[in-house]
């Protein structure tokens, strides 16, 4: 994972599996991040034939000890 970016995974709540990963720059505001992730969530739902409301985003937190 690149430093200076926030990393997210799109999770299917019915299965609990992550089905898509995406990274965004830290310079984006919270509103911009939410808007971008919502656009991608809709695209992922359409491409995979999944009901939109079953998908949600989780931020992937990096543990500094694991990356050193």
Image (cartoon, grey):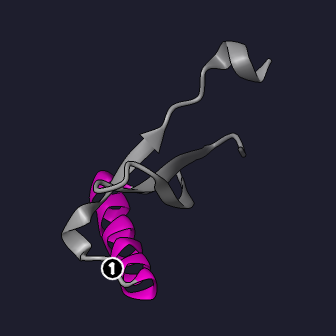
**Residue visible at 75% across and 23% down?**
67
Residue occupying image coordinates x 48% and y 51%: 8
Q: Residue at x 55, y 60 (%)?
A: 22
Residue to which mark 1 is pinned: 42
Q: Is residue 12 left or right of residue 53?
A: right
Which residue of the protein is positioned furthest toward the right in this rendering? 68
Task: Measuring from the top left, give residue 55's x and y in whole percent.
Answer: 30, 63
Q: Residue furthest front?
A: 15
Residue 38 placement: quadrant: bottom left
Which image quarter: residue 43? Answer: bottom left
Q: Position of residue 56 (x, y in %)?
A: 30, 57
| The C terminus, quarter of image | top right
Q: Residue farthest to the left?
A: 53
Q: Which residues are magenta?
A: 29-48
- Tell me the quarter of the picture where residue 51 sits: bottom left
Name the side, left or right, on which 23 lies relative to 12: right
């Amino acid at each position: 994972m690149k430093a200076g970016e926030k990393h997210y995974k799109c999770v299917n709540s019915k299965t609990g599996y992550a089905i898509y990963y995406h990274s965004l720059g830290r310079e984006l505001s919270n509103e911009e991040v939410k808007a971008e992730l919502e656009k991608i969530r809709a695209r992922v739902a359409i491409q995979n034939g999944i009901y939109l409301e079953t998908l949600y985003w989780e931020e992937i937190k990096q543990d500094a000890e694991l990356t050193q």
